[in-house]
Amino acid sequence: MSLALLLLVAASQGGGAPLDDFVARARSGTARYRDPEAARAAGYRPVGPDFPGMGRHWIHPALILRDTLDAAQPPILEYAELAGRPTLVGVAYAVLVKEGQAPPALPVPDGAWHFHQGTVEEESFLRSHAGLGHVMPGPRIAVLHAWIWLENPDGLLATDNWALPYARLGYRAPPGASRDAARALALAAGDGGRAYLEALLHAVGQPNGEESGALAAIVARHQAAARARAPNVGELEHCWVALWSDVRAAVRPEVWERLRAIQ
């Protein structure tokens, strides 16, 4: 399927001329950034890790500080390594709001926005994107993702794009593929997937030294299993479930209770 057709499919999930115009403006404004060096020259810089379902955030400091949003100038670009090179897969918009109110500046449903609290760099780290940040009263950062350069099976404006693990390995995400299968495939897709999962287990579970060693061995073993099973969805789902069963058996109950939030 051509990129133009992929875009039409994604845009049609939201429907309506205002959203179509938003997508067109976003694509027009960021087409040149399909070359990462052009993005760097324009002032964007990579921040934080490469998330399995998002890619890596490239932030433009001047744009992130603006009070207004422009569809053609997203303050965040999202890149993922596809076919051996950083590839622009989506964009994101971020603005400071009061008490979690959705900003009115873009023609998207209020429910498309999600909220973080903290600095841009803090909000690019593991706990926040796992949904485990601390929520406090006061201003928060409203964030909107738009997958204008890689079709998202969950919709143009969904926060995560679980087609990414498939694209990283040169596959097309099958219809109805589960998130568990995509997460197992993300683990299979290079050392970045393994490092991300290990870091997440450490940050959330807070295991001791012995448990950390056991978890690293479990992740490595199931990474090999996921690679052997790709892209079979049913077997990948089984691999992901088996990984968490081994994790539970390897850690103390209090560590497992913390990890259940990201299972």
Image: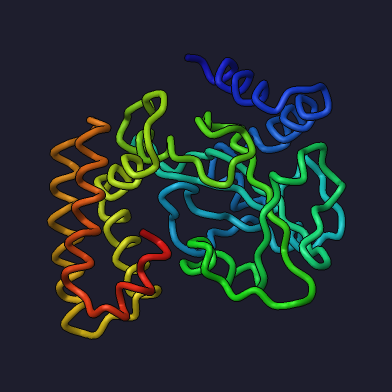
What residue sits 72% from the left and 35% below the top? 26
What residue sits 81% from the left and 63% below the top? 97
Q: Is residue 154 above or below residue 253?
A: above
Q: Identify the colour scheme used.
A: rainbow
Residue nearer the viewer, 258 or 168: 258
Residue nearer the viewer, 81 or 154: 154
Question: In the rendering, at what x and y percent does residue 75 appear?
Answer: 70, 53
Q: Is residue 80 above or below residue 149?
A: below
Question: In the rendering, at what x and y percent does residue 84 appear?
Answer: 34, 40
- The residue positioned farthest toward the bottom in the image shown: 208
Quarter of the image where the C terminus is located: bottom left
What residue sits 59% from the left and 36% below the top? 147
Please count the marks in the image.
Answer: 0
Specify the quadrant of the image occupied by residue 200.
bottom left
Specify the quadrant of the image occupied by residue 208.
bottom left
Question: In the rendering, at what x and y percent does residue 9 appear?
Answer: 60, 19
What residue sits 48% from the left and 69% below the top? 127
Q: Is residue 263 above or below residue 22?
A: below
Q: Is residue 16 above or below residue 55?
A: above
Decide if residue 237 is on the left or right side of residue 222: right
Decide if residue 66 is on the left or right side of residue 263: right
Decide if residue 45 is on the left or right side of residue 204: right
Question: In the rendering, at what x and y percent does residue 244 appear?
Answer: 25, 58
Decide if residue 260 is on the left or right side of residue 69: left
